[in-house]
Amino acid sequence: MSGTKRIIFFVDQSINSSSILFLFNSFILTPMTEYQTPKDRAYTDTLINSAKKEAAAFLNLKHTAERKDGVIPIKYRELMSVAVALTTQCAYCIEAHITNAVQAGATREEIAETVFIAAAIRAGGAVGNGLMAMRLFDEASQVNP
């Protein structure tokens, strides 16, 4: 175990789990200097070849969703794709679909509206989950009054 740091600490009951996780990550994990970068694209073939059937199914679905002969015009397909990419926070998807949307004739204003529509819908999901949280609280409170 040469070079490995072993840290033992006791946690006060009043410290929340986020603080514990922060302490753990700060002391144990080696920090990454970068996450997604264009260099990652070099692993595309590795990923596809490591799961060929799954990759083929995914790529078929992707090509079907991005087809140009659908009832929904390509510009609208790309604006929808931008919104989804923003909510899933996929940097590569955002880049690709912004480029595709611009090529399909989307304007800066349409992209801006798409950003805020996606943000509002994502926030709405938190409210929807908040309703469930209130119900779960009531259910848990009845079990453990």
Image: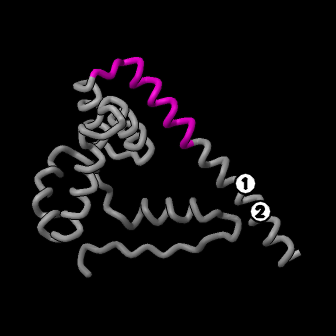
- The residue tagged 2 is 135
- Front-lying residue, 16 or 48: 48
User: Which of the labelled discs sits on residue 86, or is there none?
Assistant: none
- Front-lying residue, 133 or 72: 72
Q: Is the C terminus in the top left, top right, bottom left or bottom right quadrant?
A: bottom right
Q: Position of residue 37 (x, y in %)?
A: 22, 45
Q: Residue at x 45, y 29 (%)?
A: 114
| Secondary structure found at label 1 | helix
Residue 116 on the magenta segment: yes
- Examine the rendered structure and indicate whether residue 1 appears above or below residue 54: below
Q: Amino acid at mark 2?
A: Arg
Q: Position of residue 50 (x, y in %)?
A: 15, 70
| Secondary structure found at label 2 | helix
- The residue tagged 1 is 131
Residue stretch in magenta: 105-122
Direction from residue 113 to residue 72 in the image, left or right: left
- Front-lying residue, 16 or 111: 111
Q: Residue at x 84, y 70 (%)?
A: 141
- Examine the rendered structure and indicate whether residue 56 appears above or below residue 100: below
In this orientation, does residue 97 appear? yes
Q: Amino acid at mark 1?
A: Leu
Q: Could you give the CA–CA distance between mark 1 and mark 2, rounded to whole angstroms?
A: 6 Å
Q: Position of residue 86 (x, y in %)?
A: 41, 40
Direction from residue 138 to residue 125 in the image, left or right: left
Q: Position of residue 82 (x, y in %)?
A: 37, 36
Q: Main secondary structure of the magenta part?
A: helix
- Front-lying residue, 117 or 62: 62
The reply to whether discs 1 and 2 touch (Cβ–Cβ < 8 Å) is yes
Q: Residue at x 34, y 46 (%)?
A: 90
